[in-house]
């Protein structure tokens, strides 16, 4: 069965600073990987996805993620965060037609 | 394009009471999902529908949970009777393919 680990429960970043959120997955075959964002009281919004091809994928809101098969990782990055990026971020892997999520990383932005 | 609609947004009930959640998926999306999200956790799949058929309900606690999707559009998830441990956010999602799911805002259930 597939699984996702997000080792950072909570990250605090200054506005304008760069961001990297970590995600490690476990899946026997080629993974389909996703990052979602959840703002308070809202559902999940898809930021980006990786299926195949270029290992650096671009998403919405200036986010990007890099797939590294050798490290079983799919880390999310943003060069300069905005206060509106404060939210919960979830990494997910699709396997056997089932989406499995990590436990999430809560991002706090300080002025 | 309207997104996934869920109601109610919030529900507070006493334990042993029944509760129902409703979901209207994006028009044309044949696949509908119900997830449960416990506090501090990621969503976990409860049931997946392809049109009217429940194709994966392996994680649905069938002793107290039931779901239906009449006419392959709207869906209802029911809990009877509710327990304290059922307090969570219940998310509905829909998709054209498995690869991109669109989530509703969820129903936050509190069981007292």
Image (cartoon, coloured by chain):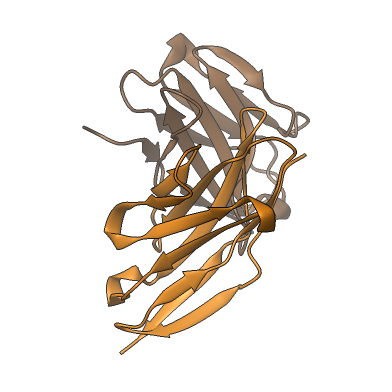
Quarter of the C terminus of chain A within the rendering: bottom left
What is the x, y in percent for residue A39?
39, 61
Q: Looking at the rendering, which quadrant does residue A64 occupy?
A: bottom left
- Give the color of chain A as drawn: orange
Residue at figure coordinates x 43%, y 66% from the top left: A77
What is the x, y in percent for residue A6?
63, 63
Compared to residue A81, the image places residue B102 above or below, namely: above
| Residue A43 seen anywhere in this rendered image of the structure | no
What is the x, y in percent for residue A107?
46, 74
In the image, A58: left or right of A50? left
Please name whichever residue, B73 or A66, is drawn nearer the observer in this view of the structure: A66
In the image, A27: left or right of B71? right
Residue at figure coordinates x 64%, y 42% from the top left: B17
Numbered circles on residues, count: 0
- Give the color of chain B as drawn: brown
Q: Looking at the rendering, which quadrant does residue A108 occupy?
A: bottom left
Residue at the limit of the structure toward the bottom, as seen here: A111
What is the x, y in percent for residue A66?
49, 56
Compared to residue A106, the image places residue A109 above or below, namely: below
Please name whichever residue, A107 or B82, is drawn nearer the observer in this view of the structure: A107
Compared to residue A15, the image places residue B13 above or below, namely: above
Residue at figure coordinates x 48%, y 31% from the top left: B99
């Amino acid at each position: 069965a597939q699984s996702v680990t997000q080792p950072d429960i909570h990250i605090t970043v200054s506005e304008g600073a760069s961001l990297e959120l970590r995600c490690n997955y476990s899946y026997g075959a080629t993974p389909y990987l996703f990052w979602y964002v959840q703002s308070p009281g809202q559902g999940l919004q898809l930021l980006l996805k990786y299926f195949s091809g270029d290992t650096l994928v671009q998403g919405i809101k200036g986010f990007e993620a890099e797939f590294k098969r050798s490290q079983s990782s799919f880390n999310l990055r943003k060069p300069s965060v905005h206060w509106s990026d404060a939210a919960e971020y979830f990494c997910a892997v699709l396997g056997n037609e089932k989406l499995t999520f990590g436990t999430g990383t809560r991002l706090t932005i300080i002025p | 394009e309207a997104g996934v609609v869920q109601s109610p947004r919030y529900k507070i009930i006493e334990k042993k009471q029944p509760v129902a959640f409703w979901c209207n998926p994006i028009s044309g999306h044949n696949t509908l999902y119900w997830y449960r999200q416990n506090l501090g956790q990621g969503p976990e799949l409860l049931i997946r529908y392809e049109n009217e058929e429940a194709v994966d309900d392996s994680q649905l606690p069938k002793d107290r949970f039931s779901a239906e999707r009449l006419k392959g559009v709207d869906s209802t998830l029911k809990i009877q009777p509710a327990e304290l441990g059922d307090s969570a956010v219940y998310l509905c999602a829909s998709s054209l393919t498995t690869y991109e799911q669109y989530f509703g805002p969820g129903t936050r259930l509190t069981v007292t």
